[in-house]
Image (tube, rainbow, N blue to C red):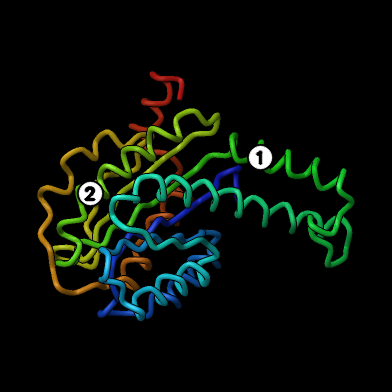
């Protein structure tokens, strides 16, 4: 959690990957780079694929994140819940590592006396409000997702609004896969709010392939580039003008 920033990849998909590297292995690579990979699987009633659902769970576990499988109509509240819970989970992990370093044992927060544990949970809650949050959103736009994309767009706008009350800075960017000429297409550059998302999905063309592994690999590269360069001039200007 370098420089007080929690970095997430939020993968939204409805099917099995069928092209490129193993997404579970790529999620593990993301975790090694300090990113958490959270996965939301969208399904229609009766359409659940056992292999697809298992892959969703494995990607999140390997990426140190959370997973949920939901019907499209439940998507908005689920995106918000997973994002916030994953943030708490990440901070919780950092606090536990600090405890082990200080005490020189394998103790974790749950092993402490109730009073001490309560104090640390207050710290976790405070960090959840004050830490900066960078979320790279990765949306599956394969053919089976076409009818679900309006719900995805609505859910992401709701997410942006729900996080504005936090003290920490929020930054989002949005990529879709498969891309027209590569594994991913950039739809929205890093931004403090997702208003620019409106209408972004209307221009997308659907494809039969689902290169989830290569898409996660590209997401890692985007995060790493941002960590090295820091916020863009446009982001700094937005923050100065709005005080966000």
Between the C-alphas of marks 1 and 2, the distance is 32 Å
Location of residue 30 in the rendering, given as x and y in whole percent from the top left corner: 48, 66
At x 81%, y 48%, the residue is 117
- Residue 73: % across, % down: 29, 50
Q: Is residue 219 left or right of residue 25?
A: left
Q: Nearer the viewer, residue 221 or 199?
A: 199
> x%, y% of residue 9?
42, 57
* Side of 44 relative to 59 (left or right): left
Considering the numbered disc 2 on the image, is that residue within a helix, a strand or a loop? strand
Residue toward you, 139 or 97: 139
Residue 238 position, x and y percent, is 37, 26
Please tell me which residue is depicted at 60% across the width and 34% down the height of the picture: 130
Query: Which quarter of the picture shows residue 107?
Result: bottom right
Badge 2 local density, few (<14 within 10 Å), some, or many (20+)?
some
Q: Residue at x 17, y 67 (%)?
A: 144
Q: Nearer the viewer, mark 1 or mark 2?
A: 1
Number of the label disc, if any, that sits on residue 125: 1
Indicate whether 204 appears above or below 206.
above
Q: How many marks?
A: 2
Which residue is labeled 2 in the image?
A: 187
Q: Within the image, what quadrant is residue 22 found in?
A: bottom left
Asked if the residue at tag 2 contacts the one at tag 1, i.e. Cβ–Cβ closer than 8 Å, the answer is no
Q: Which quadrant: the C terminus?
A: top left
């Amino acid at each position: 959690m370098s420089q007080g920033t929690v970095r997430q990849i939020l993968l939204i998909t409805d099917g099995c990957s069928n092209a490129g590297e193993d997404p579970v292995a790529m999620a593990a690579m993301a975790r090694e780079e300090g990113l958490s990979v959270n996965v939301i699987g969208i399904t229609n009633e009766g359409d659940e694929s056992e292999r697809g659902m298992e892959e969703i769970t494995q990607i999140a576990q390997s990426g140190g994140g959370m997973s949920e499988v939901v019907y499209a109509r439940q998507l908005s509240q689920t995106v918000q819940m997973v994002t916030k819970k994953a943030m708490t989970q990440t901070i919780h992990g950092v606090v536990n590592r600090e405890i082990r370093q200080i005490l020189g044992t394998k103790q974790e927060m749950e092993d402490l006396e109730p009073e001490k544990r309560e104090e640390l949970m207050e710290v976790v809650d405070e960090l959840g409000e004050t830490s900066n949050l960078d979320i790279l959103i990765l949306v599956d736009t394969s053919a089976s997702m076409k009818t679900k994309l309006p719900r995805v767009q609505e859910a992401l706008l709701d997410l942006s609004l729900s996080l504005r009350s936090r003290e920490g800075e929020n930054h989002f960017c949005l990529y879709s896969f498969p891309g027209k000429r590569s594994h991913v297409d950039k739809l929205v550059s890093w931004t403090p709010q997702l208003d620019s998302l409106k209408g972004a999905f209307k221009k997308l063309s659907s494809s039969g392939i689902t290169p989830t592994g290569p898409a996660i690999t590209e997401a890692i590269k985007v995060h790493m580039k941002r960590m090295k360069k820091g916020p863009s001039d446009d982001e700094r200007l937005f923050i100065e003008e709005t005080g966000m």
